[in-house]
Image (cartoon, rainbow, N blue to C red):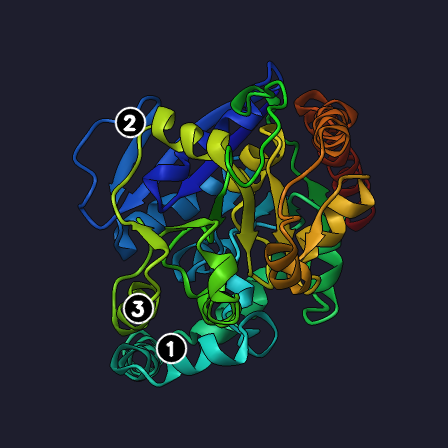
Amino acid sequence: MYSVLHIHTDAKFVGNSKRFLNPQFVNTNILLSNGDVKATIKDTKVMKKNFSSINELILLGNKSDLVILYNLDFEKSYIANRLNRNVLVIWRFFGNELYRYMNDQVEDDLSRRFNEGSLKGRLDRVWEYLAYLKTKYVSGVDFKEESDRAISRCDLFLCFSREEYSFLKRRFKNLPSLLRLPLRASSHELVPFREKTVKTGNEIILGNSRNRYNNHGGIIEILKRIPSEKVINYKFTLFFSYGLEGDYAARVRKEFRELSHVKIIEDFLSKEEFKKIYDDASALVINGYRQMALSNIYEALSRGVKVYLSQKNSDYHWFKNNGLHIFDIEDLLEDITMGTVFISKEEANHNISQLKKMYSDYTLLDFQNELLKFVESKKEYDYYMNKEIL
């Protein structure tokens, strides 16, 4: 059996550790918190985020066979760089660790202007630089150096698709080896297709949050170009219930409110309310240039909703390579104008069939077996290397 230490900093993602429930793994869950976690989390120890806890986790990590780092932020980078070489370090990629350095590739021009021109955008850059100086000259640790070293120190990189990994690898040459994450079929209900028309399913869902990587500016530009005699046939729903609040979100909110046909949802929905919107929707539009909103995309595909993504998004190519009907956001304006923003019964059933195939072709057990093979080969390699040294 192998001892596995899971280190989290976001309570919402502690459940990700369930992917490692296996008789071969003895799991320990730790949540580093700023003190904002009030409720008890099952099978998880909550620790105050400070250097005392970090040093304690380094000691605990060095007694473990595997350490899983959920989001490679400063604290986890610091831990990774102080673990013994015989400890297998696995990075569960969240996105912002690398995409923050790729704004030129993952933000459209208008959304970038929304953010850079905002007071919060300017303050964020000032605070980020001040935090860098404080970390470097007060604690004697350089965040960028720690981050670069930690990327090289990690043994495995967990994300969902080879397409995203290849996209990132072109920019970050020192990424560790890829281990794909399995899709969780149990969390996505596959439902019978219900055909929709302009009269029975004229709702178009926009984005998934306030996150600026939604590239709201590009969506706004499309909506403004829809002929007035056509736009009245549709209802547009903007998901805007979570993400950073600030000048960027305020600017986007203002722009959408000036479009009378857009409903902005700013409250968290119940699971039933969320599914009801997808039952009634004809299309989902995600303008992100990076992997995001997978739960929204799965929900749409499983309910016969037409999905529009940008070709700049690795998810577009991932789903297309798996045989699903995914549509280019560049065609959205024409489809709305021509009244073809609906998916056919054949296309919908095909998508549902291919989604099931994606679930079954690479299961949780497949993932765990791949990981165990890697762990065993590394242990064997370390054994022979140590034997040669002795």
N-term-proximal mark, 3 vs 2? 2
Which kind of residue does numbered mark 1 sit on? Asn
Residue 124 point in image, percent of width and height? 31, 77
Comparing 99 with 337, the one in front is 337
Name the residue tied to disc 2: 41
| Residue at x-position 51% and y-position 51% | 94
Question: Residue 60 appears in which quarter of the rendering?
Answer: top left
Q: Is residue 336 visible?
A: yes
N-term-proximal mark, 1 vs 2? 2
| Residue at x-position 54% and y-position 33% | 299
Q: Are marks 1 and 2 in contact (CB under 8 Å)?
A: no
| Residue at x-position 56% and y-position 26% | 20
User: Is disc 3 surrounded by few (<14), some (14 to 19) or many (20+) residues within 10 Å?
Assistant: few
Quadrant that contains the N terminus? top right
Between the C-alphas of marks 3 and 2, the distance is 42 Å
Tell whether 347 sits left or right of 229.
right
Which kind of residue does numbered mark 2 sit on? Ile
N-term-proximal mark, 1 vs 3? 1
Tell whether 378 sits left or right of 342.
right
Vertical relation: 303 (above or below) 126: above
User: Is disc 1 surrounded by few (<14), some (14 to 19) or many (20+) residues within 10 Å?
Assistant: many
Name the residue tied to disc 1: 115
Tell whether 180 sits left or right of 95.
right
Vertical relation: 13 (above or below) 251: above
Question: Residue 131 appears in which quarter of the rendering?
Answer: bottom left
Question: Residue 313 appears in which quarter of the rendering?
Answer: bottom right
Residue 246 point in image, percent of width and height? 25, 69
Name the residue tied to disc 3: 258
Which kind of residue does numbered mark 3 sit on? Glu
Residue 3 point in image, percent of width and height? 54, 28
Q: Are marks 1 and 3 in contact (CB under 8 Å)?
A: no
